[in-house]
Image: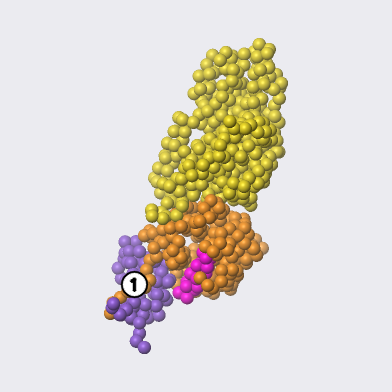
Chain colours: A orange, B purple, C yellow
Amino acid sequence: MAFQVILKRPESLTQREFTYCPGCTHGIIHRIIAEVIDELGIREKTIAVAPIGCSVFAYQFFNTDATVAAHGRAPAVATGMKRARPDLYVFTYQGDGDLAAIGTAEIVHAANRGEKITTIFVNNAIYGMTGGQMAPTTLLGMKTTTTPYGRKADNDGYPLHVAEIIKEARGVAFLARTKVNTPQDVQKTKKAIKKAFLAQIKGLGFGMVEVLSTCPTNWGIDPVSALKWLEEHMVPEYPLGVFVDKVGDEQ
Amino acid sequence: MPRVKGKIEIDQERCKGCGLCISVCPMKVIDFGEGFNAKGYHPAEPKYVEKCIACGFCYNMCPDVCITVYREVESA
Amino acid sequence: MAERVLVKGTEAIGEAAIRAGCRLFFGYPITPQNELPEYMSKRMPEVGGTFLQTESEVATINMVYGAACTGTRVMTSTSSPGFSLMQEGISYMACAQLPAVLVNVVRGGPGLGDIQPSQGDYWQATKGGGHGDYKLIVLAPSTVQEAVDLTVLAFDLADKYRTPVVIIADGVIGQMMEPVTFPEFRNLNTLPKHDDWALTGANGREKHIVVSFDIDPHVLEKMNLEIVEKLRKIEANEKRWEEYKLEDAEIVITAFGTVGRIAKSVVEQARKEGIKAGLFRPITLWPFPYERLEEISKGKKLILDVEMNMGQMLEDVKLAVKDHARIEFYGRMGGVVPTPDEIFEALKKFLNV
């Protein structure tokens, strides 16, 4: 008898240590994207577009060609790349400040054009990098450094449901909302991300996965409790599901 | 049916001691180490590795990609 | 012998870009430059290129950024308010050292302004425009033929120095029809490939990173110094200007673009009345030809700077001329184009004749 490796760090990650806080699930999402790129065998033909926010350093983490886009503009940058080089695969990695606030125009129009790019949208209901301010996705009543009394609808508006908005765009080929707070959900998220890439590879259109993620530091709770908090508070506000799937099951 | 025998390794220097792997391990293989790593964290250690069933839960939940999972197979 | 054809300025720039090997155009409608994207929307599919109408100038410049990351020739055009919107992206491109050609058909400002010809974006184009330490190469044509030639040059300079290059025109040059000779089509296989830095997939090589960012101030300073060194090279090698009837001139008119061509009529008019006038017309607004203008200004009776703004290039004229000669300024704003007669009147007033 002998031991054989069954799970290890994917090739599409560099050896760089992540800059995320302990227990932040950004790292899990990075890993499954890298696994998908490995499994699809597209590392040598992929460009990563990192956002502004905690994941600004993603350009160092993915072992692919990479850039950083201006705040919210990753879908436009990816569009420019894909139009210049349709033979390459381009994905954006964006948080909720980046995509759901300053970048709403770019994401809506990239989706509507059916731009053949893939977007991984990480929704943790808060601005992380800048210190825990309210995001468009912040829950009602949730305390942040700019909603110290809790988010109030009459002043701050409502949690923005990005996937529900994007699903109306006819250029979308795959769209799902998933979460990464259990091992089973991580696997479901990975499957969704793979389909969002396949939507691009098969030339079907725009692919996006909204991933519910944790921010233990700015939520002010420990990493394990954050997994539970996500389940109890975020999932009721942001229902999981596959909104658009033109990719099908045959892979 | 005999239980699958597994083994994990945790990169002690990469680990930030978040404890997510500990929270999801069904066999209670992992616990925090007593010592500190260079980053100042108590890294998770596979203290009871003989109980490991190679389910991969820890690997799946590790945000710092520091876990390698092995499974025992018939030698070729 | 290439044939001469009668074309409008904006369309001439578009055709010249295609001849220079540009197959990608991103743009958003804004007056007075719409004929250029319209021309590209018709022409790009004919040559196997891509035209994309974007959702905003902000998206436009970031698409240009993305395309430029792959080392592909890319272009956009806009007019003043749109150019303002692009500044953040241009700053990113300057820092990431990305080649691209940006056309600004300047209109009256500030604010919404109007849609008439203006030179009010001289400062914005030549002094940086966005945040941080950088300059862009800025080319100012004064005829349609020159617009053609400078468009081709713009692509070559952008690639050579890895920098955005601005072509600054206005509604006069944009709308004017003149006979031009277009260059031959550039063989796309001969265009620079930028294999050493472009994002083309890490196939058989280490990954490439193109960013305008580093968290370590010492690294970012090094990135800045690299840009500064490049800008010094551009200053040393790329200054361009036109001298018109300066051999015996006592009066030097300084003017660029549209005013540069109006000023030629003023020179003629002045000479008819016995005033020995000449014209110094910077073609590269940055790098500005300071040294040559200084040399020319020595011993002159008057330097008259004329612009369609409040005196923006005037600051560079003063830096060049120093105290070698008296400097006066005549300008119109808000989209008003000065006539040769009124400039000549202003000149006579300054000369007390």
Above or below: residue A1 compared with residue C144: below
Above or below: residue B70 compared with residue C321: below
Q: Position of residue C322 (x, y in %)?
A: 52, 21
Residue nearest the observer in this picture, C186 or A152: C186
A149 horizontally vs C332: left or right = left
Residue A183 colored in magenta in the image: yes
Q: Position of residue C238 (x, y in %)?
A: 49, 31
| Residues in magenta, as a range | A181-198
Instruction: Give the amino acid type for the residue marked by disc 1 in the picture.
Output: Val
Above or below: residue C179 compared with residue C18: above
Q: Position of residue B16 (x, y in %)?
A: 38, 65
A201 horizontally vs C37: left or right = left
B48 horizontally vs A166: left or right = left
Residue nearest the observer in this picture, C200 or C188: C188
Q: Position of residue C161 (x, y in %)?
A: 47, 38
Residue at point 57%, 35% (across, down): C183
Specify the farthest residue to the top. Answer: C274
Q: Quadrant of the C terminus of chain C?
A: top right
Neighbor class of circle 1 (other Cα within 10 Å; few <14, some 14-19, many 20+) is: some
Residue at mark 1:
A5
The residue marked by circle 1 belongs to what chain?
A: A
Residue nearest the observer in this picture, C171 or C294: C171
Specify the farthest residue to the front. Answer: C1
